[in-house]
Amino acid sequence: MIIRSLFVSLILAVTAISQAESLIPANARVAVIGDSITEQKLYSKYIEAYLLACTGRTDIQVFQFGWSGERASGFAARLKNDLSVFNPTVATTCYGMNDGSYTAYTDAIGAEYEKNMRLVLDGLKEIGVSNIAVGSPGAVDTKFFTRFEPAIYNDNLAHLRDIAKKLAGESNQSFANVHDTMIEAMSKAKPVMGENYDVCGPDGFHPGPNGHLLMAQAFLKALKLDGKIGEITLDLKGQSTASQGHEIITQAPGSITLSSTTWPFCFDADPKASSSNRSILPFTSFNQDLNRLTLVVKGLDKDKAKVTWGSQSQEFTKAQLEAGINLAAEFSQTPFDAAFNDLIGAIGSKQSFETTMIKNMITHFRTLGKEAEGDAEFTNALTVLKKKLMVKHDLYEANVRKRLKAVNHTISVE
């Protein structure tokens, strides 16, 4: 009993340290905020899926607040009203694409963006948001953006990036460098994939899944997630072990079966299309930074071995296996794919309801402020409606949560 208590205390201590290092405290409520790129509900889905499935934590909630065409000034105006249904403690912000006005940078554009982003950051602080990943704007595609000269508009966005970084530093918040993450990956991808491979979307500024994975990467890094999904040691001549989130069910010579409540992030199947998030992986460090499910193999007598994980097999050298391979990066098919896709689908349905709820209902409560003054019955009706909408939202939340189950999988080495 004493040993068990010490073990539980140790686990709690490790969890507390992990939470302290990240910007996601216990019972965090994360608001993902931005313009139409956020309202696409792609990087926001990736962030939510990662926080729910890849951290091994069950105490995090996420709500998407994207609004098509919005500038920082628009969110500053609706911030207090719209966020009141969720009461976030953590936020990510992504403005600047529209704030740049689709022209060359001017000091006036920069001053207006800075003024309005200050209003956003001050407003978030006022309502109790303690941790903010202040995002830069993204980028425009060097071929497909036609509203203005791409290089000149990316220069504009780079100026706004610098302002966002300055404001993050002044407010002692984290900075998410979305712009450079996209620019750097695009500069590497197009020479290999061809100029017709869009990184920032076929319209030049609304990315597909490939660009949105880059955006999620920038925000997750800014939230200071350590990226360690787990470590599994398969000892061919002794006792195998697994880190927290991965329980060994059975083991036999050369194989191990686990039950994992901490999942790796899973990708689409197509390695070439911009409509697949997998296609951007060779040109960015997502797996290295955020998606490390490490397998270490001990006791090998041969110089090479075949590793089978789920339905796929790969061959590695003894040196690679003793040093540790990243299963999430090395295997294009994983035992987690079906469960992860199911989770993404449920998150998408929830976030779609969030958009409808905020844009069609909650945001309009602002305009009824004067009508509610001095009218207790009217004020109460608005409060009841807000609560009813959140009850409906809770059903979507529960539908997401029920998909977060342990995944059983087997690794064999021969």
Image (cartoon, helix red, strand yellow):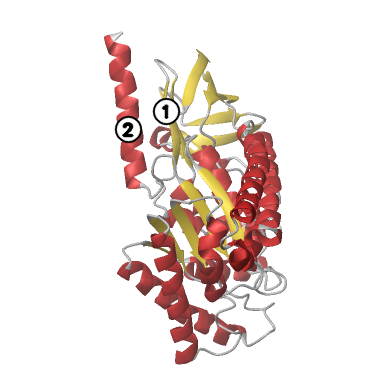
For label 1, the SS is loop
Q: Is residue 52 left or right of residue 267?
A: left
Q: For residue 346, which quarter of the picture?
A: top right
Q: Nearer the viewer, residue 314 or 30?
A: 30
**Which residue does the numbered mark 1 point to in the structure image?**
244
Q: Is residue 349 visible?
A: yes
**Which residue does the numbered mark 2 point to in the structure image?**
14
Amino acid carrying label 2: it is Val
For label 2, the SS is helix
Q: Is residue 199 visible?
A: no
Determine contact: label 1, label 2, CB under 8 Å: yes
User: Where is the C terminus found, in terms of image quarters?
Assistant: top right
Amino acid carrying label 1: it is Gln
User: Where is the N terminus found, in terms of image quarters?
Assistant: top left
Q: Nearer the viewer, residue 237 or 224?
A: 224
Q: For residue 140, which quarter of the picture?
A: bottom right
Mark earlier in primary sequence (1, 2): 2
